[in-house]
Image (cartoon, rainbow, N blue to C red):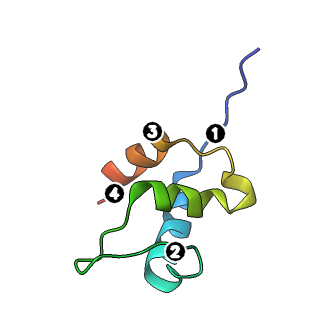
């Protein structure tokens, strides 16, 4: 049996912005001098949200690559 999880990219994008812009320290995400963060740290931070516990790295990379 395969379970398909629909990912709400808008929700993930908003939470990602919240983490990076407003609270990186709370989520243990370190930004370098240019504002970049480690993808695995971001994934761990997003998985702290109950609705994103099963988020996969491939999904996050896809969302990031499609940002305007």
According to the picture, the residue beneath numbered tag 4 turns out to be: 67
According to the picture, the residue beneath numbered tag 3 turns out to be: 58
Q: CA distance from mark 3 to mark 4?
A: 15 Å
**Which residue shows up at 73% across the image and 25% down it?**
3
Q: Which mark is residue 32?
A: none
> Helix, strand, or loop for circle 2?
helix
Q: CA distance from mark 2 to mark 3?
A: 19 Å
* Quarter of the image that includes the N terminus: top right
Q: CA distance from mark 1 to mark 2?
A: 22 Å
Do the residues bearing badges 2 and 3 touch, measured as CB atoms within 8 Å?
no
According to the picture, the residue beneath numbered tag 2 turns out to be: 19
Q: Check the image and name the residue furthest to the bottom.
A: 22
User: Mark 4 or mark 1: which comes first in sequence?
Assistant: 1
According to the picture, the residue beneath numbered tag 1 turns out to be: 6
Please state the horizontal and vertical placement of residue 24, each as a whole percent of the image.
49, 79
Please state the horizontal and vertical placement of residue 42, each as a whole percent of the image.
48, 61
- As rendered, which of 38 and 60 lies closer to the eye? 38
User: Mark 3 or mark 4: which comes first in sequence?
Assistant: 3
């Amino acid at each position: 049996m395969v379970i398909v999880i629909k990912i709400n990219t808008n929700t993930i994008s908003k939470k990602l912005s919240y983490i990076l812009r407003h609270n990186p320290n709370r989520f243990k995400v370190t930004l370098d001098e240019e504002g970049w963060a480690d993808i695995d740290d971001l994934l761990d931070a997003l998985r702290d949200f109950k609705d994103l516990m099963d988020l996969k790295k491939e999904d996050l990379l896809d969302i990031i690559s499609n940002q305007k």
